[in-house]
Image (spheres, grey):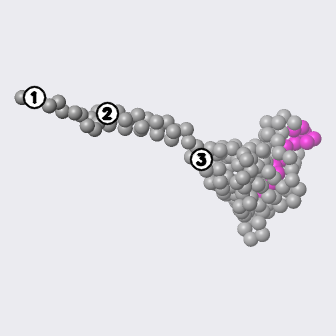
Amino acid sequence: MHKRLRQQRGFTLIEILVVITIAAILVGAVVLNLDFRNPGKTVLEQARRTSLLMQLASDQAVYSRQQFGIRFHPESYTFFTLASSDEGEGAWEVFTDERLKFQQPDLKVEFEVELSGIPIVLDELQAELDAATDEEPIKPHVMFLSNGEMVPDFRVILMDGRGENRQSVFAGEVLPIELEALD
């Protein structure tokens, strides 16, 4: 009797597991290299945070009977407080409270500022501090006064690095600080 050799058809379980493992490793490598950050959402969240912190600084000025301010830089901002002096005139100092602190988002967000409709040139904080003198001290762009006023009228435009996603934070007529998307 002649034994017939069985011919193998299909794949073994081990071969299938090896292929699945290699495919999973390749998919994992591709997923790790994808950028899931959403620039539009990041800019919107940063604009909301900026407007809320400005409102908080305004409220803090009223409740503590102290003057606060904010100074913008190309990619950040700094809050200031007016420190009183013996001579009656105060000097603006960087306010170091964790609640009123710029938090760097995942993506780079850039700022543009208009005060009373006039665009201003923004510089880095350290460069401004280095250039400040007794005759020309550093001052905030927007001040939050203890009587509840915000001066001057302002518009802060936040955008991603390519300028495609833009949000505006501005002095409003209905609400003290308003937010709007720009096309």
Instruction: Identify which amino acid the numbered label 1 is placed on.
Output: His
Residue under label 3, please give it: 37
Residue visible at 87% across and 42% down in the picture? 137
User: x%, y% of residue 43?
Assistant: 67, 52
Residue visible at 56% across and 42% down in the picture? 34
User: x%, y% of residue 138?
Assistant: 85, 43
Q: Secondary structure at mark 3?
A: loop
Q: Which badge, 3 or 1, comes first in the chain's sequence?
A: 1
Quarter-of-image position of residue 145 = bottom right
Q: Nearer the viewer, residue 86 or 68?
A: 68
Residue that protrudes farthest toward the front in the picture: 1
Front label number (2 vs 3):
2
Residue that protrudes farthest toward the right in the picture: 135
Quarter-of-image position of residue 155 = bottom right
Q: Which residues are magenta?
A: 132-145
Residue under label 1, please give it: 2
Can residue 96 be found in the magenta stretch?
Answer: no
Q: Secondary structure at mark 1?
A: loop
- Viewport quadrant of the N terminus: top left
**Is residue 104 left or right of 80 when viewed as pictured?**
left
- Viewport quadrant of the C terminus: bottom right
- Kindly tell me whether residue 68 is visible in this rendering: no
Q: CA distance from mark 2 to mark 1?
A: 31 Å
Residue visible at 77% across and 61% down in the picture? 170
Residue under label 2, please give it: 15
Residue visible at 84% across and 55% down in the picture? 114
